Amino acid sequence: MEVYTKYFRRLLVGNSPHIFPGINRNVENPSNYHLLVQEMEKITQDPEQAPKIAEIIDTSEGDIFRDFDLSAFISHFNLDPLAKTLLASAFTHVSKSDLKSKGMSPLFPMKSTSLIRYSRGDTFQRSGRAVLKSGKCSNRGRRCTPITTRNMCD
């Protein structure tokens, strides 16, 4: 992990002018930007990638890490919604309180009721349909009973 930490930190610091528009410094090695992009794209393929990135940013010293702009970092790479969620949620487990709150902020605007219901544990999954504990099926408003009784939607 130590080698990867140094590698990713160096990629991030060296390419920070690409990511954060307010940084007035030269890009150290423009040819390695694609390596940083590849590391960010691994978030949805490797379950440990987002926590590794969050830990590296949390434990690193330097100007760009002091007041890290997480929203600019996430939006710069045009990640898909799953990768954005995985990365933001990984920041909710770091030690710095400002990074924790920055990690929570991208998660709150999500208006997906199924995501909210799932996070609260209010849904059951049956044949691709979400069934609420109340017995109402989220599929076209039909009445359903919870999976525990093994009945299908009407």
Image (cartoon, grey):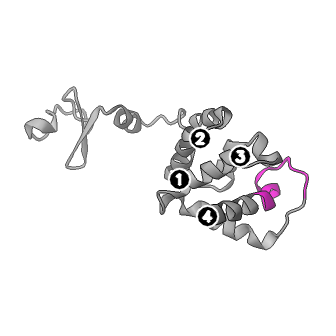
Name the residue carrying label 4: 39
Residue at image coords 47%, 57%: 47
Residues at circles 1 and 3 in contact by the CB criterion of under 8 Å: no
Residues at circles 3 and 2 in contact by the CB criterion of under 8 Å: no
Query: Which quarter of the figure is the C terminus placed in?
Result: top left
Question: Eyeballing the image, is 7 above or below 130?
Answer: below
Give the secondary structure at mark 2: loop
Q: State the extent of the magenta-drawn residues as a range.
A: 13-25
Which of 109 and 46 lies nearest the eye of the viewer?
A: 46
x and y, in percent, of residue 102 in the image: 64, 36
How packed is label 4: few (under 14 Cα within 10 Å), some, or many (20 or more)? Answer: some
Earlier sequence position, callout 1 versus callout 3: 3
Residue type highlighted by circle 2? Val
Question: Eyeballing the image, is 121 above or below 125?
Answer: above
Which of 17 and 6 lies nearest the eye of the viewer?
A: 6
> How far is mark 4 from mark 2, CA to CA?
19 Å
Q: Which residue is situated farthest in the bottom direction here?
A: 31
Earlier sequence position, callout 4 versus callout 1: 4
Name the residue carrying label 2: 94
> How far is mark 1 from mark 3, CA to CA?
15 Å
Name the residue carrying label 1: 83
Give the secondary structure at mark 4: helix
Q: Which residue is situated farthest in the front direction here?
A: 2
How packed is label 3: few (under 14 Cα within 10 Å), some, or many (20 or more)? Answer: few
Name the residue carrying label 3: 72
Residue type highlighted by circle 3? Ala
> How far is mark 2 from mark 1, CA to CA?
18 Å
Residue at image coords 72%, 49%: 60
